[in-house]
Amino acid sequence: MVMELAEKISSELDLIEADAPDESVADNATLRAAEACRSWLDASLTNSGRRNEPAIYSAHAGLLRFVAYWLEQLSQSVDASQKYKPPSRFILPLKSNRKPKKADEDIRVDGPLRACQDTLTAEEELRPNYKHVLLMAESKWSAHNQNTAYDQVIRYTRQMYACQPNRRFAWGVTICGTLIRAVLLTSDYVISSEDMDITDSAGRAAYISFIVSLCYCTDYELGYDPTVVWNPDKKYWVIKCPDSAAAKDGEMRVVDYYARDPIFEAERLFGRHTRGFAASLDPNLVDEPDTFIKDAWPYASADSQHTSQNELDILRNIEEQLGGKSMDKLGVIRAINGGIVCFSKVGNLVNDDTSAILGPVFADFKVALSQTPAVPTIGNRASAEEHLTRNISLRVHRRLALQPLGRPLHTLESPYELIIVLADVMVAHSVILKTSGYLHRDISTNNIMVIDDSEGVHGLLIDFDYAVKTGEARLAIAERTGTLPFMSISNLQNSKIQRSELDDWESLLYIVCWLGVHGINQKEQIAYRKAIITKRKDDEFYRPPLAKWEFGTFEDVANTKLVNLISDSSFNRSPAA
């Protein structure tokens, strides 16, 4: 049906492009939408010699409205032979060249798209909000700017992950002159379609087919998580966590938890997309949570060299060695429930993983990747956020319910409290290594939480996704693990020297440096970001201290740290310095 609808709409657009519209079925709004993109369809827009990217945004918006209007007409036809099933949604544009709400960067976006239940607001382009953006479209004047378009879509989509707690993967669109590409953005890869030339009937038909498919597909095919659902009336998320006790009996059951927006967001496009929610089993106690829900996409592999226990098993083993009371006293998180996230797909229960997202493409892509000498990169620069080892290309969606519930590190009030928390965490780190043999391998700001009791603040060590037992063959393999700004230099350089607790202690040093520059608590961090934005308005080439710890290749970050650690000026907090 989708292909048939796309062909009908495409043929109508061909008639309009040929100045022969069927005015008996096309209303005024539809004709206005077609007129808005006519100069783009016949290439006169891009052949005019003037660089006018906003005109491409407007033409693309007109094309989207044209498709939406036709879908609505065909689904409401009084002629039974011409009537089609109504779409699940209409894809319509938001305002272009605006800074979206909920952004942590001072950037304007080109072509954000939204999902609407009707076309009544099609002519009303609202200011974009990353929380509601369905996908990002980036327009460039020429095909020579394709890599730049990719880079921009990646940058925008990172914001979508941070603002949408139920986002599993994302779609995007690049428009370079008259050439369009559909883009699929996963935790590790950016996969692009071939060029679809909007001036060519076949190219238009292919792109319209893509848009119509988005209008009819399921939410999980759009990239949303059906096991994390927003309740608009109660204003909380309902999160289905696997019941690990039932899994032991060979059953598949879930436990519902209730939470407000996450206390940890997925801040990066590539990686595990770890999110953390403060949750409760009782919806009436959603504002008195006692459980930490961790949602992440760690690697999994059939390769025995890279197979390790999952975090649930690791935490259970540590608890067995230490005992529950000792874990609470020591400040180590305990697993209550958890497992692989599953959902129903065409009547079958499937594990949510990379292969479920990519379908048949996954096997083909693995073959292509194995035959490629280097990891695919997007844009002119390699990214240190690409996947951490070429031998692993499958991620599995896991969710854990953990206790006790701590608060984020950025809620601390003073350097004194920070030192206490960091000291507690590294004591726990050392005890776990000594008694259970597990090396954490990801000491970072997001993996340390704060717990309170009558004696004051204490540290809580969480996130054992990268933990590995000493003595495992995997520990001897050169393997980059951790969170980029806090990875040790040896780790960044992928040194053949076996990883040890010294790498984790080095990560602690980088946490102190990072918070010393960016601010310990949220108030200081917000003030620092505002100061950076102000400084960049005066000097567009200004780069804040430690900026290169977060972006670039692994080797670039390692070299930057080597230079920074011998220079006091690298850690000056003042943007004016």
Image: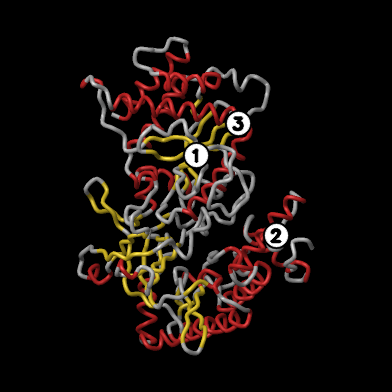
Where residue 162 appears, x then y in whole percent? Answer: 49, 55
The residue sitting at the top extreme is 20
Q: CA distance from mark 1 to mark 2?
A: 29 Å
Q: CA distance from mark 3 to mark 2?
A: 30 Å
Disc 2, SS: helix
Residue 370 relative to residue 283: left or right: right
Work out whether residue 60 or residue 492 is closer to the camera in this orientation and state it.
60
Q: State whether residue 79 is above or below residue 219.
A: above
Q: CA distance from mark 1 to mark 3?
A: 16 Å
| Residue position for label 1 | 126
Query: Closer to the camera: disc 1 or disc 3?
Result: 1
Where residue 262 appears, x then y in whole percent? Answer: 44, 63
Tell me which numbered mark, 1 or 3, is placed earlier along the sequence.
3
Disc 1, SS: loop
Residue 310 relative to residue 482: left or right: left
Identify which residue is drawn at 39% across, 17% down: 12
Q: Are marks 1 and 2 in contact (CB under 8 Å)?
A: no
- Give amino acid for label 3: Pro
Work out whether residue 218 or residue 72 is closer to the camera in this orientation and state it.
72
Tell me which numbered mark, 1 or 2, is placed earlier along the sequence.
1
| Residue position for label 3 | 54
Query: Closer to the camera: disc 1 or disc 2?
Result: 1
Crowd around label 3: few <14 · some 14–19 · many ≥20 (10 Å):
some
Disc 3, SS: helix
Where residue 556 appears, x then y in whole percent? Answer: 67, 58
Work out whether residue 330 or residue 312 is closer to the camera in this orientation and state it.
330
